[in-house]
Image: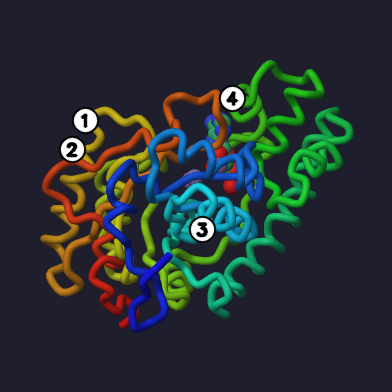
């Protein structure tokens, strides 16, 4: 991507902003089922001109995605979706346009890699106690060289004939409050935002409505995210009804009103694509509502976002 700004980070071309924009998706480097190459090629076919690959807790797919993006003449932003804790709750923080070699990010990824390996063993032990033998080997096989997560256990349970689909595996065994829902000491949200910004990236609070929080808690989360120097919020994630979009916009207004100093949070969007058979999160299916400032303005101006 060219040209570059004074920090060596890319500025976006008009071409990059001329089609669909999708800043949240997954490949086989984490829990997606398309390789980075297949993902980028599919995004191109869907009319995407600016894509961020944001695998869970890894940047391992970025090199391959970048190579295919050059072939497809599509602009690829290196990204990541970091798992973090806000209090005792798990939240996801997307990092966009990160320098994947920055020490802060390498360290953040290394910590999570270790936590995910330990958690996979614990999940497997619990499932085996319930009579599901071979869970670890099965999930590891499906994860391949990618970062292992609960979806790999869910897919293994489907393949082994224990449940009829992944949704049921989460509902019965892996989702909140079930035996496979192991408590993990993920790094805190504040330090996660700092790691992303330390790597020159923009920190985006992913899918705020998917944490099962009350309005009051959501407002508190946004205030804390602002105070942690978060840059943007996903205003649209996958197919979303207008009521939900308005709810998030309302939260942004309230966060701005309660924190006059750090300025307004920017707006991001993404499909959260994982696999082709989920049309509600198809690549490029998202559009920002009017009246918000998009997160990509950070890169168009070339402004230094690391203060
Ligand atoms: P992990 O990061 O390993 O804890 O797994 C979280 C991932 O599991 C999410 O990114 C989703 O892709 C997937 N997931 C979470 N909840 C469900 C669910 N109820 N049904 C299917 N997949 C889910
Ligand atoms: Mn996922
Ligand atoms: Mn997520
Ligand atoms: Mn995601």
Among the 4 quarters of the image, the one containing residue 289: top left
State the image coordinates of residue 268 (x, y, percent, origin top left).
31, 51
Closer mark to the observer between disc 3 and disc 2: 3
Residue at x 44%, y 32% (from the top left corner): 281
Count the marks. Answer: 4
Residue 80 - label: 3
Among the 4 quarters of the image, the one containing residue 118: bottom right
Measure the alpha-carbon separation of dots 1 and 2. 6 Å
Q: Residues within 10 Å of mark 3 (few under 14, many from 20)?
A: many
- Rendered view: 180 above or below 279: below
Residue 246 - label: 2
Quick one: label 3 or label 2, which is nearer the N terminus? 3
Measure the alpha-carbon separation of dots 3 and 2. 26 Å
**Relative to 304, is 194 on the left or the right?**
right
Name the element at disc 2: helix
Q: Is mark 3 within 8 Å of ligand 4?
A: no
- Asked if labels 2 and 1 touch by Cβ distance under 8 angstroms, the answer is yes
- Asked if labels 4 and 3 touch by Cβ distance under 8 angstroms, the answer is no
Name the element at disc 3: strand
Closer mark to the observer between disc 3 and disc 4: 3
Name the element at disc 4: helix
Q: Is mark 4 within 8 Å of ligand 1?
A: yes
Q: Is mark 2 within 8 Å of ligand 3?
A: no
Measure the alpha-carbon separation of dots 4 and 2. 28 Å
State the image coordinates of residue 264 (x, y, percent, origin top left).
18, 63
Closer mark to the observer between disc 1 and disc 3: 3
The residue indicated by pointer 4 is 167
Quick one: label 3 or label 4, which is nearer the N terminus? 3
The residue indicated by pointer 1 is 242
Q: Residues within 10 Å of mark 1 (few under 14, many from 20)?
A: few
State the image coordinates of residue 287 (x, y, percent, origin top left).
27, 39
């Amino acid at each position: 991507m060219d040209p570059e700004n004074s920090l060596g980070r890319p500025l976006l071309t008009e071409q990059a902003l001329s089609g669909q924009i999708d800043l949240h998706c997954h490949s086989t480097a984490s829990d997606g089922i398309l390789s980075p190459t297949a993902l980028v090629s599919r995004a191109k076919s869907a009319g995407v001109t600016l894509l961020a690959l944001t695998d869970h807790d890894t940047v391992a797919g970025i090199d391959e995605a970048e190579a295919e993006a050059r072939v497809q003449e599509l602009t690829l932003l290196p990204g990541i979706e970091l798992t973090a804790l806000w209090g005792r709750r798990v939240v996801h923080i997307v990092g966009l346009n990160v320098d994947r070699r920055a020490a802060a990010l390498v360290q953040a990824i290394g910590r999570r890699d270790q936590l995910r390996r330990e958690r996979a063993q614990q999940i497997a032990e619990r499932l085996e106690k319930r009579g599901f033998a071979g869970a670890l080997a099965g999930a590891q096989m499906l994860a391949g060289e990618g970062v292992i997560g609960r979806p790999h256990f869910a897919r293994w349970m489907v393949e082994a004939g224990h449940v009829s689909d992944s949704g049921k595996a989460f509902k019965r065994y892996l989702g909140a409050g079930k035996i496979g829902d192991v408590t993990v000491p993920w790094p805190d949200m504040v330090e996660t935002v700092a790691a992303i910004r330390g790597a020159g990236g923009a920190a985006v609070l992913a899918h705020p409505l998917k944490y099962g929080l009350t309005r009051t808690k959501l407002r508190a989360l946004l205030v804390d995210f602002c105070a942690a120097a978060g840059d943007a919020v996903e205003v649209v994630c996958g197919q979303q009804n207008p009521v939900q979009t308005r709810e998030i916009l309302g939260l942004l207004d309230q966060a701005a009103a309660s924190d006059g100093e750090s300025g307004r949070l920017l707006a991001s969007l993404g499909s959260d694509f994982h696999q082709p058979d989920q049309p509600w999160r198809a690549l490029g299916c998202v559009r920002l509502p009017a009246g918000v400032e998009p997160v990509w303005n950070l890169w168009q101006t070339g402004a230094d976002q690391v203060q």
